[in-house]
Image (cartoon, rainbow, N blue to C red):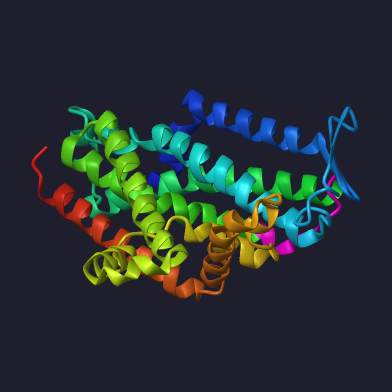
């Protein structure tokens, strides 16, 4: 009961922040922009036919089937809008939860109540997850309806992006919560969590480069180092591949217009690497990432439990 009350209070605190409504407005604007785009045989129309983009000249885009339209939704809408802009704004919105809890005067009142510090920390952490779950549910459901009614492609698996978005956010928010406990500063929490996120993405990108250019693997030390780091850190970009697999989407490289044959070989290798990532067991990629998150949260809870306030 105490834990539920803490989660509820944290969620109510998020509703009082203007960025909650800013995120809601951005999500609605993205869905409205998607509704203004339509697909027809051999073409894409914008603003209900005001502009038309002919795709018949491109071999890869000549047939915009359901798998390619699903790839457009997952790789560009979910990955760019939610995966980067959305998570960044969400981190900014929630970074102050833990530092606000530790402000002088507030923490003394909470610690005077019959509740353990561990439960207090978990309640605040889960409150942020509820904040993200609400936004993820709204955005995914609305865009799911737009894709089905306007783009004429119904993807039930796309709805599974809701828990995936929450999991993606949790990877980064674990670092934010740890920074909030360590430095009691929302600014530090934002900077360190976004920095960690960039580092996670950089490690994954480095691994993808080794897959795209096999000759690089001849440097065994560099390849072993990147492979080890790739396993240890949260696999943030794999969330997109899992969502693509569950939605029945094709690889994002199939949306690339025709290029010269010499330039197409790296794209083909990238596509092969992408399909291998889509075939990975979700339990492996998500489980190993949650292991990293669990270690960071345990360190944050240990620091919170041992500190004097």
Q: Residue at x 82, y 52 (%)?
A: 148
The answer to whether residue 1 of the structure is visible from this angle is no
The answer to whether residue 50 of the structure is visible from this angle is yes
Judge whether 124 appears above or below 14 on screen.
Answer: below
Left or right of 48, for residue 181:
left
Judge whether 84 appears above or below 51 on screen.
Answer: below
Q: Main secondary structure of the magenta part?
A: loop
Residue 205 or residue 259, whichever sits in front: 259
- The location of residue 121, given as percent across then percent down, is 28, 49
Residue 26 or residue 217, whichever sits in front: 217
- The location of residue 269, given as percent across then percent down, is 54, 65
Residue lying at the far top in this picture: please name it. 18
Residue 82 or residue 229, whichever sits in front: 229
Q: Residue at x 71, y 52 (%)?
A: 258
Image-quadrant location for residue 111? top left
Residue 103 is covered by the magenta coloring: no
- The location of residue 109, given as percent across then percent down, is 22, 34
Of the 4 image quadrants, the one containing the C terminus is top left
Q: Residue at x 36, y 51 (%)?
A: 202
Judge whether 4 appears above or below 33 on screen.
Answer: below
Of the 4 image quadrants, the one containing the N terminus is bottom left
Left or right of 268, for residue 177:
left
Left or right of 62, for residue 102:
left
- The location of residue 162, given as percent across then percent down, is 59, 54
Judge whether 275 appears above or below 240 on screen.
Answer: below
Image-quadrant location for residue 254? bottom right
**Which residues are the magenta region?**
150-159
Count of numbered badges drawn on the protein: 0
Residue 151 is covered by the magenta coloring: yes
């Amino acid at each position: 009961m105490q834990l539920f009350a803490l989660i509820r209070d944290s969620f109510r605190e998020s509703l009082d922040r203007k960025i909650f409504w800013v995120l809601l407005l951005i999500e609605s604007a993205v869905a409205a922009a998607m509704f203004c785009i339509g697909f027809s045989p051999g073409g894409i129309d914008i603003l209900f036919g005001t502009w038309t983009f002919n795709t018949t000249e491109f071999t890869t885009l000549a047939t915009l089937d359901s798998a390619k339209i699903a790839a457009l939704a997952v790789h560009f809408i979910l990955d760019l809008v939610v995966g980067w802009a959305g998570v960044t704004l969400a981190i900014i919105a929630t970074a102050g939860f833990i530092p606000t809890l530790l402000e002088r005067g507030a923490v003394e009142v909470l610690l005077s109540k019959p509740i353990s510090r561990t439960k207090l920390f978990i309640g605040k952490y889960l409150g942020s997850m509820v904040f993200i779950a609400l936004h993820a549910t709204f955005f995914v459901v609305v865009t799911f309806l737009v894709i089905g009614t306007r783009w004429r492609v119904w993807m039930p698996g796309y709805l599974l992006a809701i828990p995936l978005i929450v999991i993606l956010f949790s990877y980064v928010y674990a670092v934010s919560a740890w920074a909030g406990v360590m430095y009691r500063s929302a600014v530090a929490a934002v900077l360190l969590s976004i920095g960690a996120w960039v580092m996670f993405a950089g490690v994954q990108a480095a691994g993808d480069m080794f897959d795209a250019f096999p000759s690089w693997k001849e440097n065994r030390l560099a390849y072993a180092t990147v492979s080890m780091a790739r396993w240890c850190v949260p696999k943030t970009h794999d969330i997109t591949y899992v969502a693509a697999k569950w939605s029945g989407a094709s690889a994002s490289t199939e949306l690339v217009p025709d290029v010269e044959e010499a330039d197409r070989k790296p794209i083909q290798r990238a596509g092969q690497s992408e399909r291998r990532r889509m075939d990975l067991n979700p339990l492996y990629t998500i489980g190993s990432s949650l292991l990293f998150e669990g270690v960071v949260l345990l360190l944050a809870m240990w620091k919170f439990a041992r500190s004097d306030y």
